[in-house]
Image: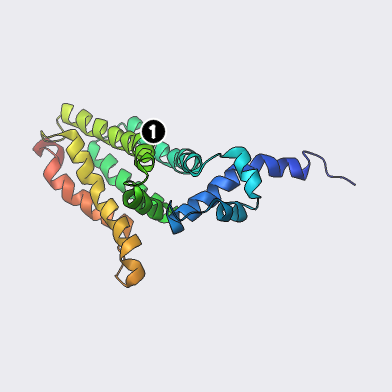
Amino acid sequence: MLATGAPKFRRRKAARPGEIVEAALAVFAEKGFAAARLEEIAVRAGVSKGALYLYFETKEDLFRAVVEQAIAPNLEGVRAMMAAHPGPIADLLRLVPERIALLLETLPLGGVVKMVIGEAGNFPELARVWHDRLVAHALGALCDAVAAAQARGEVKPGDPRTFAVQLIAPLLVGVIWRETFVPVGAEPFDLPALARQHVETMLTGMLSDGARR
């Protein structure tokens, strides 16, 4: 007896763009942009190269899809959490960097971060897409949260954007360390632990006297 529901080949066809994006994320993280081959991405996704071209005309298009479909939704959840947080800034800042650190450990983002940094000179569109779709949104939301806390008297005077960068920067260093030095024998950092310790250090300098009471 035939199974009810959509035929298997239809379900497979509908799933193909997502499978291609997932394969591309893995290949970009492992090989970088210049060395990534569409043939390898197609093989990992279980499709022909011709089928891949039905969905993505260029490698740049595929990178945009990786950012838009595989990465941005995760950061959007963090951004929405920041926008909706009703409580003291200290509670939010203890949560956000650790949440980002967990994303960096559970998704193959470190290799892509390294790729963007290393290859942006030859492929500036990588940096443009990464900044405009990811960095600007996440940093902007954190900057807004800091500015709002300053207006409430919780955070000392200072440039909110600089505070935001200071909060996130150690995670970037930790990722670069992991992707560059750990493969040659360096001891890795525990990114969530790094985030927690750094936030406590930052809060000591950021919070007003009233917010620390």
Question: How far from the left and from the top, in percent, is residue 22?
Answer: 54, 49
Taking the spot 34% from the left edge, 34% from the top edge, the residue there is 137
Residue highlighted by disc 1: 80
Q: Nearer the viewer, residue 193 or 154?
A: 193
Question: How far from the left and from the top, in percent, is residue 131?
Answer: 33, 38
Tell me if residue 206 comes above or below residue 41 in the rendering: above
Tell me if residue 203 comes above or below residue 197 in the rendering: above
Question: How far from the left and from the top, in percent, is residue 13?
Answer: 69, 41
151 sits left or right of 8 in the view: left
Taking the spot 26% from the left edge, 32% from the top edge, the residue there is 145
154 sits left or right of 80 in the view: left
Tell me if residue 207 comes above or below residue 169 in the rendering: above
61 sits left or right of 157 in the view: right
Tell me if residue 120 comes above or below residue 144 in the rendering: below
- Is residue 213 visible in the rendered image? The answer is no
Q: In the displayed orientation, state which residue is furthest to the front.
A: 122
> Within 10 angstroms of label 1, few (less than 14), some, or many (20 or more) residues?
few
State the count of labels: 1
For the residue marked with disc 1, what is the amino acid?
A: Ala
Q: Quadrant of the C terminus?
A: top left
| Secondary structure found at label 1 | helix
Question: How far from the left and from the top, in percent, is residue 205?
Answer: 12, 45
Q: Nearer the viewer, residue 56 or 96?
A: 56
Q: In the displayed orientation, state which residue is furthest to the bottom.
A: 185
